[in-house]
Structure formats: C-alpha cells, structure tokens
Image: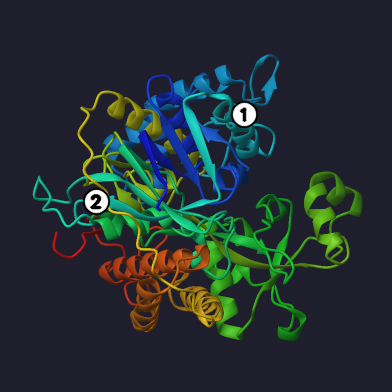
Amino acid sequence: MNTTHAFDVLIIGTGLAGMTAALQLAPTMRVAMVTKRGLSDGSSQWAQGGIAAVLAEGDSFNAHVEDTLVAGAGLCDEEATRFAVEHAPAAIAWLRELGVPFSTENGELHLTREGGHSHRRIVHAADATGAAVQATLSQRVRSTPNITLFENHMLVDLITDRRLKKAPANGKAGRCYGAYVLNELSDEVETFTATHTILATGGAGKVYLYTTNPDTATGDGIAAAWRAGCSVGNMEFIQFHPTCLYHPQVKSFLITEAVRGEGGQLKLPPSQGGKRFMPEHDDRAELAPRDIVARAIDFEMKKHGLDCVHLDISHQEPQFLKEHFPTIYARCLELGIDITQEPIPVVPAAHYTCGGVVTDLSGRTDMEGLYAVGETTCTGLHGANRLASNSLVECMVFAQAAASAIAGAPTHEQPAIPEWDVSRVTDADEMVVISHNWDELRRFMWDYVGIVRTNKRLERAAHRIALLQAEIDEFYAQFHVTRDLLELRNLVQVADLIVQSALQRHESRGLHFSRDYPERLPEARPTILKPQGE
C-alpha cells in the first residue's frame, strides 16, 4: 500500500529559498518540506561571501541594478533585477528579526565589497554567511508547528495532468498536484499531494567533474520541471570558480581569490617547466576577473594535457600566510601540502547555475500550481554571469514573492492520484552501471562543455548524452528506483539542456565562451527551451 501525504503546500528543497517560503507560509498553511539528505545539506550552507543589499549611505538601487546589468553581460531582465534589488533591504531586515548573527561594527551592520560592486553593500557573517543564515532558519523551521520536515526523501517526479493522462485544462502545461517522492529510509515511493508545489532544489554543479557544490546539486528540480512541460532558460551559463583544491581525498574545497590578491602566482607544474602563465593571457595577470582566469587555466590544462595547475604563494612569509589564510593553511597541511614551502594544486570548478526553470516575479512557472525559487530558476536576475552575493538575495526575495502569490491563490479540488508502480525489481548490475555512467557523464561534460567550448566538442557531448539517456530510460522503466538512479537521470537531463542551449548561442557572452563564435552579438537574447509538444 502506497503511503499518501496531503498538504496545502509541498516545498522540495531546504536551502535558504525553501525555508524562506516555508516560514512565510506556515502561519496560515500546512507545509511539507522534502529534502533528499538533511535539512542543511544544500548549497546555501556553503555560501561564504554574503548577501548584497543597498544599505550604505551614498549607495543606491540604481547603482546596484547597474552593477548587476554590467556583470550579466547585457542579458539580465531589468524588471526582475530592479525587483530583487529593491526588495533586498527588507529581506535583510527579516533575517535580522529572526536572529541571524550578521557581522557588525560600532553597532551597525558591517558591509564589505566584492568584485563587480561599485559600493560596500555585502552583509555577511564573517566568512561563513550561508552557514549562519542556514543555522538560524533551520532552528525556526524545526520549531514551527505547521511545517512537517521529511529528510532523506527525494523527488522522483511531479504529479501533473500529463502524468494523470488528463488533457490540460488551459491547453498549456496543465496543473501540478504534488509529487512522487522516494523515502530512502523505507525504500518506498510515497505520494505527496498539495494545492501548491515549490521547487527549491538548487543548481546542477555535480554535472561536472570538478565543482564547489555539495553532492546534492544534481539539478533535480530543473529536470523534473522540464519533464513536466515547463520552459527552461539560459542553461548554457555555468559560472566556474578558477581555483578549487585538486586532491584525490578532497572535494569542493575552495582556494579563495584572496590568495591571488596577496600575490599568489599561477604556474605550470615542474614537469612543464613551472612557468608562470597568467601574464600571457591578460595584463591584470592573476588579478583578472574570474572568467578570464578560469579560461586561462583551462587553456593551459588542455594544451599540456594536465589534471591541474599550481598556485604558488610560498614566496610570502610563513607567519603572514598562517595569519591571513589559517583555514587554507591547516587544510592543506592535513593533506601533506605546506603552502609556506610548496604550491597548491588547483583546478577550476563549476560554481553556480545561472539558468534554470523560467519563472515570473512571483516564482510562477508555466504550470499552474507549480512554483520555483532560488538557484533552480531563471528569473532573469543573473543574465549571462551572476554578480557576487546576488544569489542569496534572489533566494529570499522570490521565495517571499511566491509565498505571497500562494497565499492569495484560489484553492482547487485534488483529483484521484494513482499509486506508484511497485512492481519494479532491482537488477544486480544496476549500481555498477549507474556508477560508470555517472563518471563518464561528469568527465565528458568537463572536457566538452566546460569553460571553453567549440561546436565539435558540444556535438560530441550531445552524441554521448543521447546514448546515456537511452540506457538510463531503460533502467528507469524497468528497475526499482534508487537515489543514485534518480540523480543520474536528472544530471543527464540537465546536461542535455546545457548542451542544447550552448549549441543555440552563436556568440561568446558572459560565461559562455565559444572558439567558433568569439564575438558578442549586438543584441542580447535569452535562450529559452520549451519541451516538445508545447
């Protein structure tokens, strides 16, 4: 017998976007929060920098909007950008009311400045803002009576008119009635029905071999929305961080840009002569913008067949390094790397998914009853390149807007929902094939659809994705579902969307750099993909 849960609102994902929506809705609605790991295992927890908001004297909404538009390489939606910027101060005030311990100076919020910003406007909690926000909100979520938390539960698929074999009433994508969700503890697929469903599942960094994202970032919401019939936008724009530690025992450890700011030099390994290479790529050398540094490292790695390059700051005094970079010094030393004596092996890593499910300013998707918030979305705020510290802003502002829209939306009757088919069996070979396919996907996405692209590389990736999709569809149709199978299914779908989008963009703009189309076209247009039959 299939377990069924009925709620007013189903929120899939428990990062800042999901928790903001839940806390806004809980006073008047019964809310279910579903997360495939623990409450704090998403990307919000990892955010080091802060939250951008106009709070300083001399700053202005117009300046923040302009900085965002410039970073977005002409592709930001100005209305969405202004909406996010103008609502950011109120979002910060809400977090302070909840008790988030932001850094202060003389009783006032301490504002720092990051690349691309014309003023000091980054509200932060030391260098672990995401963790501080997540801890405060997690405590609130767990203590709020109207919120029921389902940890170790993973989205399988949305329940829609199409799924129920009903003709969509509005002739478009139809309506969402909830979702099928895998309970990993019982190993059963359960049914969650809800008048409103919110996707807050984060980005898709795990589609790449190297990423700063947690293991949960497998594009689940983007893939599920696409399968349900929703439009997806700007998926070619993946932000890469230039310097992630390269080590077999460690994933996702960032080497902050401040190391380069304090004189760190990027060099080839000794086997290639140990030469410093950034001055050949840009006059600003190691202090060039992120995308330029990441492209230069990628170029040198491909040119010389390298797995990584070296970041050397050993010429600085040991005491200076221990004082300025205590975390990096300690972590590297644990791994046998003494940064006072030797260089740090680094590699660029996928950092942020700028595209996603297309929404309006209230988080509405193409489908009635289905909303999306946070990194899962394409609101138009980030354009072709996200401005630093605008991501947590987007999470809160659009989650609050979605909650307002849901609170004012009419109710509707739920149809009879069929139970999940439990007749599938587990195949003995399934897990090893999933593991191999996962590794193959992440490696060829890194090689062919990474920082620098060509038509030939993209076409190679498209060919391999088609083969993998056929294999995974067969597994999914026949075998018992597992989290590994579901995540691989979603990653392959997201990979396909990234490649499709990249093939459609015949220019280089922002984070999308093509050797076949190195120039930027005069008109900036988003890449919007619509499912077949739409």
Q: Nearer the viewer, residue 39 or 388?
A: 39
Where is residue 463? Give x, y as percent.
34, 83
Q: Is residue 308 left or right of residue 82?
A: right
Q: Nearer the viewer, residue 80 or 292?
A: 80
Where is residue 320? Give x, y as percent.
86, 48
Residue at disc 1, secondary structure: helix
The residue to which callout 1 is attached is 139
The answer for how far apart the CA atoms under marks 2 and 1 are is 33 Å
Residue type, numbered disc 2: Thr
Q: Residue at x 33, y 66 (%)?
A: 497
Q: Is residue 120 visible?
A: no
When the figure is inspected, residue 188 is found, relative to residue 150, above or below; the finding is below
Q: Nearer the viewer, residue 36 or 309?
A: 36
Residue type, numbered disc 1: Gln
The residue to which callout 2 is attached is 160
Where is residue 128? Give x, y as percent.
67, 39
Res 245 label = none
Mark 2 / mark 1, whichever is N-terminal: 1
Q: Is residue 517 left or right of residue 448?
A: left
Q: Residue at x 39, y 59 (%)?
A: 237
When the figure is inspected, residue 206 is found, relative to residue 454, above or below; the finding is above
